[in-house]
Amino acid sequence: MANFTLYLKVYVLLFIPFNESILVYLQKIIFSMHQMRVEVWSDVVCPFCYIGKKNFEKALVQFEFAKEVVLEWKCFQLDPDFVQNIEDRYNIREELAHKYRRSLAETDVMLAQITATAESVGLHFDFERAVRFNTYNAHRILLKAQDEGIGNQMSEAFFSAYFEQGKDLGNRAELKEIALKNGLNEKDFDGALEDESFAYSVKQDIQEAANLGISGVPFFVFNRKYGVSGAQPPQVFLDSLKKAYKEWKGTADIKIEHLADGSSCDINGDCN
C-alpha cells in the first residue's frame, strides 16, 4: 500500500502538474486509502435519520481513530412518487393519521414521542411547520456537496431546514439559498440539477440499497462489512466503529452482517 501511494504521488507531480482537477481527484484517492468508510443511506424527510446522525456524531467524538473515518452519504427516497402541491399545504398530522389509521389524538402522541427523542439529542423538531416535498433534487445537491467535501455540512443544513425551520426545500430558490449558504456556489448548484450524472447517481444509490437488502433508513454500513439500522444510541455506533476498525484491512464483502436494529423509516414511508 505504501509503495502504491508513493507511486501515485510521483505520478501526480511528474505527469500532470498543470491539471488541477485530476490532481484533486488523485489526492482524494490517496487520502481515502488511509480512511475507513462509513456509508449511511438516508432521506431528508426521515426524522430518525437526523436523530441517528446526531448519535453517530457523538460516538465519533469518543472514537480514538475518528480522523481515520470518512462518512459517505447515500441517497434513499421514502416517497419517490410524492408530488408537491404548493397550493394545498401538506398536513402531516392528517396524512399520518390516515396512513396509519389512527385518530389525530393518537397521531399527536406519536409525533410528540419523536419530538421528545429529537430533543434528547439537541434537536428541536417542529412538525407543524414542516413542508413536505419530493427529496429527489435535494439528493442531487447533497451528492454535489459530497464531491466538494461538504456533504455532512449540507446534510445537516437540509435536515434542520426541514425539521426545525419549516423551509420549503421543494422550492428551487429556497433550496439554492441554503446550498449557497453552506458552501456550494451558483455554478455547482445549477450543474447538479442540470447534469444527468447526478440524477443517475441518486438512482444508483437507491438501487444499491435494494441490492444490499436495505429497506429502511437510516442504515449505516461500516467498512462494507457491518450494518446498523435505525437511530441507535451512541454506544452502539461506537461499538460498531471499534469492531469495523479492527477488521479494516480485511475483505470488503458486500454481504453485510447486521449488528443492530433501531427506530427507522422504511421504503413505504412507515416510521417506527
Image (cartoon, rainbow, N blue to C red):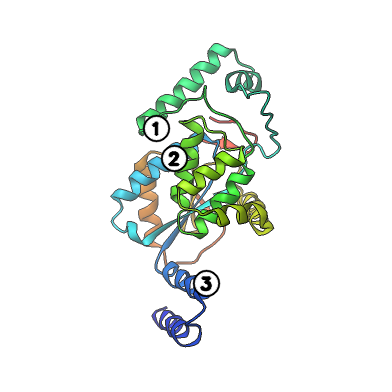
The answer to whether residue 219 of the structure is visible from this angle is no
Between residue 190 and residue 78, name the one nearer to us. 190
Of pointers 3 and 2, the one earlier in the residue sequence: 3
Determine which quarter of the picture holds residue 76. top right
Secondary element at image label 1? loop
Residue 82: give its label: none
Q: Quadrant of the N terminus?
A: bottom left
The tag on residue 123 is 1
On the image, the x and y values in percent for residue 56 come to 39, 45
Q: Is residue 10 left or right of residue 79?
A: left
Secondary structure of the residue carrying numbered label 3? helix
Label 1 amino acid?
Answer: Leu
- Amino acid identity at mark 3: Ser
CB under 8 Å between discs 1 and 2? no
Q: Which residue is mark 3?
A: 21
Q: Residues within 10 Å of mark 3 (few under 14, many from 20)?
A: few
Q: Residue visible at 52% across and 60% down?
A: 147
Query: Which of the marked residues, 1 or 3, is nearer the chain's N terminus?
Result: 3
Q: Measured from the top left, where is residue 70 in percent x and y?
A: 42, 58
For disc 2, the marked residue is 52
Q: Nearer the viewer, residue 152 or 54?
A: 152
| Residue 126 in the image: above or below residue 175 | above
Could one spot residue 195 in this view of the protein? yes
Q: Position of residue 175 (x, y in %)?
A: 56, 42
Closer mark to the observer between disc 1 and disc 2: 1
- Nearer mark to the viewer, of 3 and 2: 3
